[in-house]
Amino acid sequence: NNLDELMSRQVELEETYPYCVAWIDCLSKGDRLGRGVITAGRFAQISELDGKRASDPLAYEPAKPIAAPSFAPSGLLNRWSVAAFNEAWFRKAPKHRVDEIQSMATFFHPLDGVAGWNALYGRAGFVQYQFVVPESSSDVVRVAIEKLSAIGAASFLAVLKRFGAANPAPMSFPMPGWTLALDIPTGVDGLAAVLDELDQLVANAGGRVYLAKDARMQPHLLPTMYPRIGEWNATRDAMDPQHRFASDQARRLHR
């Protein structure tokens, strides 16, 4: 019913289920701030599968997508339409649903079930924003939801996960802690300022923004969020000393 309960339950479920993800209602406020629905899963044993799946347990079952409109009307996804969707989604979710076998495509990639889902945001598009903060700074997740809710930043795709350790690469994004991923329609008044503020909060907490989704972070925060950037720069310089290969993001962040 709220963020504290959601995060606590997610930690409990991870003792049994290695894959846990929560959808969050980012427009809820007050005692219901951060309410959501958790999906938890583990790989099934062959003995748990029905005849068809048991005979070929590794067979790929692609999603059969429904088609989204080529482009939705501008403004279709606003605080009112998303609030209505969130309320309906929260109410339709069962209190408990267990022992359901799903394909990996269905469980891990639910958006593949809607072809062209990004068109729902209209021609103006959307901003993807994802960050991770250490376990000890989980309050940043609450602050982010509060600030985005206050300006009506209506993300109907808001996903909360708990990460394990990073891989050895110097620019690896994960760290032990909480990650919040959002798809926010462009054009929300005050959005740029709020995201800049959240970037700073995340950096101060020892967290980082996901660069694979970033298109707006300020360059001065990069060394704080990714303290091993020097190792990456050394590798880049060794492989491409004249910097012939560079993305727009690299040019923005390496001023």
Image (cartoon, rainbow, N blue to C red):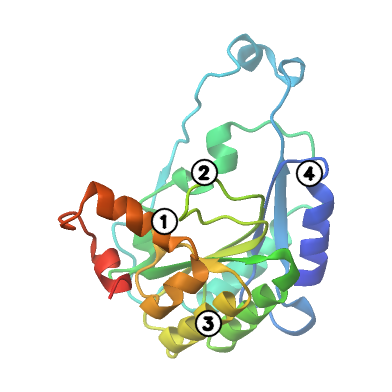
Q: Between disc 4 and disc 1, whose residue precedes?
A: 4
Q: Secondary structure at mark 3?
A: helix
**Please, what is the three-letter code of the amino acid marked with disc 1?**
Glu
The residue that mark 1 highlights is 231
Q: State whether residue 136 is above or below residue 9.
A: below
| Residue under numbered circle 2 | 109
Q: In the rendering, at what x and y percent does residue 120 appear? A: 39, 63
- Furthest toward the top, the residue is 55
| Badge 4 or badge 3: first in the primary sequence | 4
Question: In which quadrant will I find the N terminus?
Answer: bottom right
Give the spatial CA distance, label 4 vs label 2: 19 Å
Residue bearing the label numbered 3: 200
Work out how far the residue at label 1 is from the one at label 2, CA to CA, in angstroms.
33 Å
The residue carrying pointer 2 sits among few (fewer than 14), some (14 to 19) or many (20 or more) residues within 10 Å by Cα, namely few
Q: What kind of residue is marked 4?
A: Arg
Kindly report which numbered mark, 4 or 2, lies closer to the viewer in this rendering.
Answer: 2
Q: Position of residue 209 (x, y in %)?
A: 49, 67
What residue is at 56 percent from the left and 42 percent from the top?
108
Q: Amino acid at mark 3?
A: Gln
Dot 1 crowding, Cα within 10 Å, few <14, some 14–19, many 20+? few
User: Pointer 4: what residue?
Assistant: 97
Query: Please, what is the three-letter code of the amino acid marked with disc 2?
Result: His
Mark 1 or 2: in front is 1
Distance between the Cα atoms at labels 4 and 1? Answer: 46 Å
Residue in the foreground of this view, choosing between 141 and 218: 218
Could you say which quadrant of the image residue 5 lies in? bottom right
Label 3 packing within 10 angstroms: few (<14), some (14-19), many (20+): some
Is residue 174 among the parts visible in the rendering? yes
